[in-house]
Each structure stands twice: as C-alpha cells, then as structure tokens.
Image (cartoon, rainbow, N blue to C red):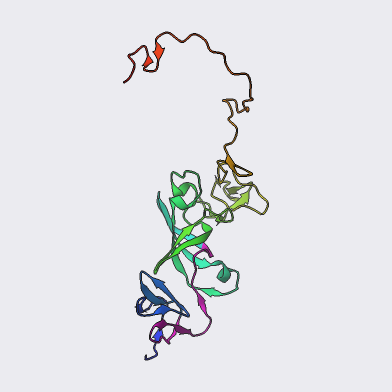
Amino acid sequence: MEKKLVLPGDHLSSAEESEPGENTYSDKDEVYSAALGENVSAPGHAAVKGKGRKLKLPAVGSEVYCMITKTGPNKAIGSCVTVEEVEGHGRGIEMDGVLLVTAIRRGYVRDIRDEVKLGDIIKAKVQEVKRSELSLTIFDPQCGVVAAFCPKCRQRMDLKDRLFICSRCFWKERRKLPLAEGEALEQGEAEPRYERREGGFRRPPFRGREGFRREGGPRREGGPRREGFHRGGYGGAERR
C-alpha cells in the first residue's frame, strides 16, 4: 500500500478489512488515524507511523480535564485534554466532551447547571470514546469541578469549606466537587442502602420519626376491632 501522510481522524479502512493497530482507533466498525504520520497499513492490519511526539488518544477509564463551553438543563459540553498532557507527561489530542445530567452524582440532579457551570474546569473520567467526542462522567469521588469563575466579575473563585467564593465581589456558589484525600463522602453521595454482614446483606435498623432506633419489646396484645373496619376498608362492603 502506498504510504501517505494522514491526520488524526482520517479514515483508514473498515474494521472488517483491518484490525486497528498502532496510532489508530475504531469507531462504529471503521478504523481511523489517531496521530499525525504515515499510513503504514498492510492487508488485515491498520497502522500509522507517527511523526514527532506521539499523540495519545483518551481511552475509556482515563482521566481528562475539560473546560465547560456550553451548558443546558440536561448536558454540558466542553473541550478536553488528558491529565497526562496537563501534567507534562505526554501529548494528547484535544477533543470535545459531553457530560450528561445522569453522570453527575448518584443522587437526583434536577438541572446540570446546579452542579457545573459555564467556564468551569472539571476533572472527569471517559466513559466512551467516539470519533468526534468523548462521553464523560464525574461519578467518581475524585472527579468534579477543580476551578470555577465568578459569574459576576469573571474572577477565579477560591474554594473554602467546599464552597466557591469570589475574593473580589464575595459571590458564593456550590459545585459538585472532588473529594480531598481522607475526606468523607457527602450525605447521600454514595451511601449504601444495605449494611454488609457475614453471608450477605441486611437492611439498616428502622428508625422512628424522631430518628431514634426502635428497640424490641413485648408484642401488642389483641383487642377489640374498630367499628366499621374489616378487610374491605372503613365502613364499606368487603372487596371481592
């Protein structure tokens, strides 16, 4: 096959014709280049010989930093780079990322803009790699908003007691934040519904309206039935 220069995202072959090799990736049964270089594909095998520094494509499960450029009630869109590139350990490809409202936290989120806002920089994990974008999640306790800017004066806000505060106009806002090392999860963030015990799980003890644990005691003795009450309801005919 004639060698030619290819760019990241250039189509190389179908997945049926060739298996993805070095500096390539597959999407929807098609194989594309993941780097700038020469197409050195052979029959049954697609590969690209990179030129210069190797470009690293974000993989499923890898961490990325993403600047939010667009928000709506149900999703946020941003521009993402790998954590390795930001920390100077490699060079990656900048890609668009999509964060859905269902990928914020395990509790109910009414509007994604209650957790992340325009201009925020988030640390996220890659759920899925598509040809033109990444599917992101910040479920992980170590993921969330790492930098935020004041909506009033655009000053970078300081984080104090898990609250972003503007030092210029004193505006305050909350975000979905990553946990610091040794910090406990927020109530309802990932609290188990059942307690683990040897041989299985058991439900947590029932607590009354005041929050106190109900202790065991003698069973209530039988007494006269209320007037008009029976299996059919209150004062009505029995259901059949």
Q: Is residue 179 magenta?
A: no
Write the start and end of the magenta stretch as one range: 36-65
The single residue placed furthest to the bottom in the displayed view is 2
Q: Quadrant of the C terminus?
A: top left
Residue 32 figure quarter: bottom left
Q: In the image, is residue 14 above or below residue 145? A: below
Count of residue discs: 0
**Residue at image location 44% in from the left, 82% down from the top:** 47
Q: As drawn, is 32 to the left or to the right of 219? A: left
- Find residue 156 and report its horizontal and vertical position in percent: 57, 56
Q: In the image, is residue 32 above or below residue 195? A: below
**Residue at image location 56% in from the left, 13% down from the top:** 221
- Find residue 208 and report its horizontal and vertical position in percent: 58, 26
Closer to us: 21 or 230: 230
Residue 129 figure quarter: bottom left
Q: In the image, is residue 142 above or below residue 163? A: below
Q: Quadrant of the N terminus?
A: bottom left
- Find residue 74 and report its horizontal and vertical position in percent: 40, 50
